[in-house]
Image (spheres, grey):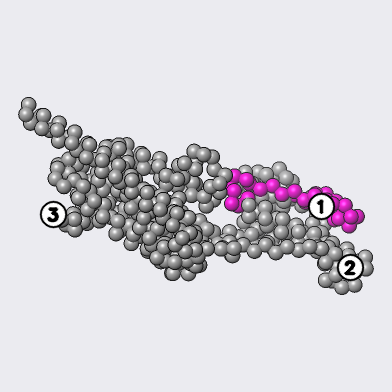
């Protein structure tokens, strides 16, 4: 049999094996659509917060309206004491509580600086960050309005002049590469490659295990072992690459997310990532030589991928062990190329380093073939000894 016949034989195996069929055909699409559906809203808004108004004045109600007017927050509960609000926050009914102190209006008019306290649930890091930023914006806007009214009352003839005295310096903060802070673009575009890596490595292990389960691994590899292994893996390489292209098409064509770079660079990076993941999968299988142990290695190796990619936590601040683990994950190098192309629009030179690193994962395939041949020789020699006995 030539190499193409091995590929055709593996396609028939995929159609017969339910697990392989799921991992290569419908499960990746289901996982992608699930992740996209979760973050399809794009921007978190109307997060429920509670207000404890201990002043009950016109100015305190005015501040409450400022908080409620924020697109990020919605005042859903009014409480009479901080204890009630605290209980509601522990029950996850609200994400934050705002405490307006006694004599808030009186102290403000007398020129004092009354303190408004906001407590938020820091366990939800993203939500806490959003509420913190929204509260700072609401308080800043409210303070500027109060100071503007004071300045007009003390003689500033023009509203703009009064506002200028209240806020002498105003800054403009412009986010680059994700101008509308869309969390779908930020998270989904990174979650999908990390899940994809898990699927590729796991499918590679299960594909080799299929032969061990159906006809015996060494019987299958008795002749032309390297050609059979390469033919088997090649059948999945094309399927995985089609998956990657469909993911890119959905995100950057169908959903029209910004794409500023070169599609050719991104496709080459995807191909190298597929080959790298297959190399790691084959190496893990022939290192473990048992499916349960190999799948445990796959889970331990690939599960932390999203945390180590450097998307939600900067890679420069990771400890040495995390950086080493990150360097062993193909998706960590692929995602840098994806970010370069999608956001920065760089060329081949900027992507060359990560492409080179991805190509080095082929060493794992060489090691896998060497382990396979060693185990095969031992198995065949053992069978020969038994036959002579």
Residue at x 10% of width, y 32% of height: 384
Of the two numbered discs 2 and 1 in the rendering, the one whose residue sits closer to the viewer = 2
Towards the viewer: 124 or 345: 345
Q: Is residue 334 visible?
A: no
Q: Of all residues shown, which one is farthest toward the front?
A: 349
Towards the viewer: 77 or 32: 32
Q: Earlier in the sequence, mark 2 or mark 1?
A: 1
C-alpha gap between disc 2 and disc 3: 90 Å
Q: Residue 340 appears at what percent x and percent y?
A: 49, 60
The segment highlighted magenta reads 99-128
Mark 1 vs 3: CB contact within 8 A: no
Q: Is residue 307 visible?
A: yes
Residue pointed to by mark 3: 1
Vertical position of residue 360 compared to residue 268: above or below: above
Of the two numbered discs 1 and 3 in the rendering, the one whose residue sits closer to the viewer = 3
Residue at x 49% of width, y 47% of height: 307
Q: Assess disc 1: are there few (<14), some (14-19) or many (≥20) residues with their C-alpha within 10 Å of its C-alpha.
A: some
Q: Assess disc 3: are there few (<14), some (14-19) or many (≥20) residues with their C-alpha within 10 Å of its C-alpha.
A: few
């Amino acid at each position: 049999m030539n190499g193409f016949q091995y590929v055709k034989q593996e396609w028939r195996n995929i159609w017969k094996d339910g697990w392989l069929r799921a991992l290569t055909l419908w499960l990746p699409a289901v996982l992608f659509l699930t992740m996209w559906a979760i973050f399809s809203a794009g921007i978190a808004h109307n997060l429920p917060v509670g207000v404890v108004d201990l002043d009950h004045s016109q100015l305190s109600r005015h501040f409450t309206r400022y908080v409620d007017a924020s697109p990020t927050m919605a005042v859903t509960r009014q409480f009479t004491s901080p204890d009630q609000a605290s209980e509601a926050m522990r029950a996850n009914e609200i994400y934050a509580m705002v405490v307006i102190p006694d004599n808030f209006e009186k102290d403000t008019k007398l020129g004092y600086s009354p303190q408004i306290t906001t407590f938020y649930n820091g366990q939800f890091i993203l939500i806490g960050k959003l509420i913190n930023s929204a509260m700072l914006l609401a308080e800043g806007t409210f303070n500027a309005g109060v100071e503007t009214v004071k300045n007009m009352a003390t003689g500033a003839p023009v509203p703009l002049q009064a506002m200028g005295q209240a806020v002498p310096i105003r800054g403009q903060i412009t986010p680059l590469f994700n101008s509308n802070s869309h969390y779908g673009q930020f998270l989904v575009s990174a979650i999908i490659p990390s899940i994809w890596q898990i699927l590729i490595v796991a499918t590679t292990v299960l594909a080799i295990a299929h032969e061990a389960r159906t006809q015996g691994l060494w019987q299958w590899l008795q002749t032309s072992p390297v050609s059979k292994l390469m033919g088997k893996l090649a059948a999945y390489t094309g399927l995985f690459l089609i998956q990657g292209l469909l993911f890119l098409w959905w995100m950057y064509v169908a959903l029209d997310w910004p794409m500023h770079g070169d599609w050719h660079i991104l496709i080459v990076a995807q191909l190298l990532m597929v080959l790298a993941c297959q190399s790691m999968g084959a190496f893990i299988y022939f290192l473990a030589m048992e499916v349960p142990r190999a799948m445990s290695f796959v889970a331990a190796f690939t599960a932390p991928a999203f945390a180590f990619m450097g998307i939600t936590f900067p890679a420069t601040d990771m400890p040495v062990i995390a950086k080493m683990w990150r360097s062993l994950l193909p998706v960590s190098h692929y995602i840098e190329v994806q970010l370069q192309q999608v956001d920065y629009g760089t060329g081949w030179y900027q992507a060359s380093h990560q492409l080179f690193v991805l190509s080095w994962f082929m060493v794992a395939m060489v090691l896998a073939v060497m382990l396979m041949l060693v185990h095969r020789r031992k198995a065949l020699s053992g069978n020969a000894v038994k036959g002579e006995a």
